[in-house]
Image (cartoon, rainbow, N blue to C red):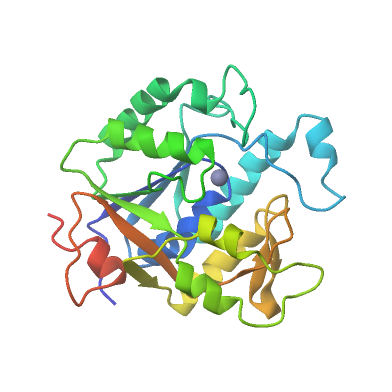
Amino acid sequence: MEDLSRFRVLAVHAHPDDEVLFTGGTLADMAHRGAQVRVVTATLGEEGEVIGSALQGLVASGLLGGYRARELADAAAALGVESRLLGGLGCFRDSGMAGPAHPRALVNRVEEATAAIAREVADFAPHIVLTYGPDGGYGHRDHIAVHRAVHAAVPAQQRVWWAVFDRESNYAGLEREIPQPWSRPSTQYLDNFTNVAQVRYALPPAALTAKLAAMKAHPTQIWLQEEQGAYALSNKLAMPVLDAEFYQPGQACTLEPGLSGAELLLAGVE
Ligand SMILES: [Zn+2]
């Protein structure tokens, strides 16, 4: 196992839970191997839907954002990484999926977010940045805003990888009985949610264990059935727990033949 202690890795995400669903195993593995790993999250996910009846009161009481800040902190601890909120606690608000966005919403303040990300990058000087591709992973406007702000904020030589859900792996992971009370996602849903990934990051057992613990730290958002190897969001569509995460080259990346995982993401980094 190569020691990564000379590397700094920055992940920039839109909402609490994205850090674990898109990149959690990668971040845990790199942190276990000594890298300094920091997650910057742009919003508190105030517009998210909540799973189950026990925590529904968070929505009507307006407490969801604060609760999700706690979930994010617990998830980061499980992954063994640092966590920061872009601009400070509650600075940028979740924009929601559609409709008029709050005046403080991220989508209405992308230039401010860009400046805040530029400060984070100047402060941390990451060797690599992980964020979403141009479609935000599945089209959420906060994810697209984060993609744009990251790319506007970083210098041209900054290496940026885009975290994606791999189409083939997700289809293969759903070729089995779907745990109750969930449904099988449609082809249309999966094709919107997934991409044909070029980089596979295989997760060692310790990283997968940390990822599962971090998923459990988000009870408002992620419903995990660990023995079934599956999870669902509030839409109750089953998704497989995979032992790998996936990336596309975003900016200043090279796809070194024969390499994968951290060795590929960090190949040639000075
Ligand atoms: Zn999100």
- The answer to which quarter of the image holds residue 47 is top right
Would residue 11 appear left or right of 41 to someone viewing this image?
left
Please determine whether, in this image, residue 165 is positioned above or below residue 136: below
x then y, percent, for residue 115: 34, 24
x then y, percent, for residue 38: 40, 47
Q: Looking at the image, which is closer to me, 145 or 7?
A: 145
Please determine whether, in this image, residue 256 is positioned above or below residue 87: below
**Residue found at x 65% / y 42%:** 68
x then y, percent, for residue 252: 18, 49
Please determine whether, in this image, residue 21 is positioned above or below residue 89: below
Ligand 1's quadrant is top right
Q: Quadrant of the C terminus?
A: bottom left
Would residue 244 appear left or right of 224 to someone viewing this image?
left
Number of labels in the image equals 0
Would residue 243 appear left or right of 213 to someone viewing this image?
left
Would residue 239 appear left or right of 168 to someone viewing this image?
right
**Residue found at x 56% / y 77%:** 173
**Residue found at x 54% / y 65%:** 211
Q: Is residue 27 visible?
A: yes
Q: Quadrant of the N terminus?
A: bottom left
Q: Is residue 4 visible?
A: no
Q: Residue furthest front?
A: 188
x then y, percent, for residue 67: 70, 40
